[in-house]
Image: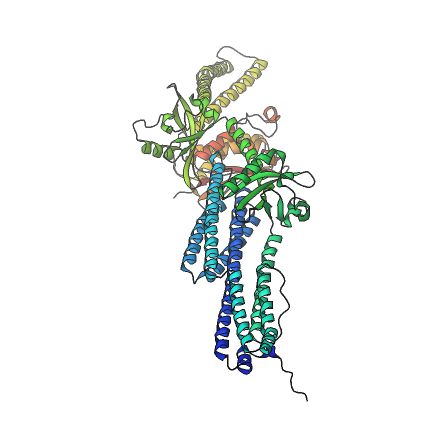
Amino acid sequence: MNPPKFDPNNLKIAHKGFVLASIPLLLGLVFLGCLMYLLNQAEQDAQREVRSQTINYESNLLTQDIIESVSVMSTYALTKQVVYLERYDETQRKANQSHQTLLELVRSNPEQTAMLEHMRGVQKRLNAMLEQLRDSRLGSFGDMNDFANVLGVRQQLQGLVQEYFRENGAFREAEKAELTKRSLNPAQSRLRVKQFVWLGILATVLIGASLVYFFSRSITLRIGTVMDNALRLASKKPLNPALEGTDEIAHLDAIFHTVAGVLDEAALRERAVVDNAVDVICSIDSGNRFMQVSPACKTVWGYAPEELLGRRVMDIVSSDDADKTLAALSHVSESHSSTLCENRVRKIDNTLVDMLWSMYWSAEQKTYFCVAHDITERKAAEDRVKESEATVKLIIESLPVALIISDSQGIVETNNMRTQQMFGYRGNELSGKHLRLLLDVGMDQSDAEFIQTIREKSLGQVSELDALRKDGSHFPVELSVTAFDSRGTPKLLTVALDVTERHEIERMKKEFVQMVSHDLRSPLTSVKGVMSLFHSGLFGAVNEQGKQMLERSESDVDRLVGLIDQLLDLERMQAGKMQIDYEVTDLTSVIERSVSAISFLASKNNIKIETPTNSPEVFADGSKLVQVIVNLLSNAIKFSPPNSTITITCNEIPEFVEVRIRDQGRGIPASLKDRIFERFEQVESADYKQKGGRGLGLAICKAIINSHHGMIGVDSEEGRGSTFWFRIPQPT
């Protein structure tokens, strides 16, 4: 077995000096110590460089996350699409992770830690405003300021983003200064190494020519390789192959290769971020030509990156926006700040897309760094919002009612055209005025008392009040007030309807009712009396034909008088003047009185009426219930076939007593079940001629039951009869 071959590269430098030159041991030790110091210094500089690049990389990531958070949440505030919330939360998570990484990297530097915490404060304010955008609601009713408020928040966000950029720039400058302060210039480092190397060579020459050759082969050339690797590392060129051996030089060379690997990995991560970004990230030289473009340009603009390199930015910007874009670039380079610019870019297929550019000028590199975000969808959403707002405004302006939006103290903020027409004001005359200027309510009250009075009378309900025009004239209005919040601020929506015409109609109706009551009913009563005298023979004998004519005339007069009585009853009920005498009433007695009143008509039509044997008590006006049951029985008899049965039942249900009257008639179509309780409504138009009646009986029944705080309805199916029912509260 051959012994292992001696390799001087595996021998430590100290050992080489001791073995080869024991005499210059002291010189060799000094040389070695200084060289190790320099090498260690170079290693520390390399580590600081790696740390600095890592800090810059994480800072860039954090800045991109901040920009993306603002962009995504702004888009969500306008579109309300949940996908943007998910992107926003993911971006926030990455931003927090980057911030934590930066804290770990600078924890040994109090100044940089403080700057990072200050950046965190700006980020928190930015996040707070983004959370406001998360809860924003655009297009709220009538408030044209809502959209402007969102844009105001957007402007504040831009201010905070710019502040964050300044803080981030200061942080990076501090890191650069720290690196410069603590690290030697590579040239100086190389110079020192060379000086010590040559000193060693000279010392070695003094010892012996033979040792010079040996040391130059085992140390000097290898150190040259390490130095060359240092230069290559600084210029980002590939390193020489790793040195063989296990000595310190080989170890140092291995460290350089490790550092190079770390830097390459960091560069790959940075490139991956740029290549996978949704927005177009690019750099532009001072001549406005593309230097680098991220692959996103293919998706956004249709151009491959190589198609844009060397081209002027203005070649793809719409000619209408070229001046604006150039002005923004000039402003950034002159002010040494960042800015935002919106323009339109012409895609490769000649279609236009709306873009939002974030521009930053690097004076050192004389380069613009830009991020271009596609805002075509946002612009389209804004156009849709504007169109929707215009439609809503048109609807509001076309409404026949006055709409007034005021603050919670009653100060008018906005109103529609009908308000101005109704109250006699023009333009914005009402803005800033108090609501009491329009309503004659508690004129001696304070503003707060006036608002309280309005709330009590009209909040959530309709009330009739006296209104005031600008000229001092009065007119009646129906007023309704609704309280709502607009971006956390309480508001009042006041709706006023001019009911002057309705009052005039009511006056005419009262006059008509009075005319019917006095000018028709009284003469008809007199006519009926005269007919009765003729029929009794007071004015002589009347032949058979005359008697028939008298009976027919009396029947017509009775029908007219009954119709007039029903009209008068209905008007009294609707006017709230019907007197209801509430008392505990035996429903059995009410049913018996009702059946007795209608028994002649039932017998005439050969109709049988079945009644309950025992009925509960109700709290009601018995005579009014008799009127209801008689009307319902009369209808049931008129529409029931001969030899049929009408059944009356009573049931106790929670808090009510229900009376049901079931017949075996033709039934009622489903489309008419609600309408038949209105005035002058009948199932068929021929019913008036064939069955009689004017369609007022059910309307009267409904009015009576409503006045008892009950309810009335019908269950019916065509061809299978009908069941009319009403419910009256039980005695408490």
Q: Is residue 123 above or below residue 645?
A: below
The residue at the far top in this view is 540
Q: Above or below — where is 167 with respect to 19?
A: above
In this rendering, does residue 219 appear at all? yes
Residue 380: image location, x then y, percent: 59, 38
Q: Is residue 241 left or right of residue 73?
A: right
Where residue 508 appears, as percent x and y from the top left, is 46, 18
Horizontal side, residue 654 vs residue 642: left or right: left
Quadrant in which the N terminus appears:
bottom right
Q: Using the rendered image of the protein, determine whether residue 615 is visible from the camera's viewpoint.
A: no
Tell which of 234 and 69 is nearer to you.
234
Q: Pick the residue in front: 467 or 603.
A: 467
Frontmost residue, 257 versus 716: 257
Q: Quadrant of the C terminus?
A: top left
Label total for image? 0
Rendered image coloring scheme: rainbow
Residue 262, placed above or below residue 279: below
Q: Position of residue 243 (x, y in %)?
A: 62, 71
Image location (x, y in percent) of residue 672 = 59, 33
* Residue farthest along the right direction in this orientation: 349
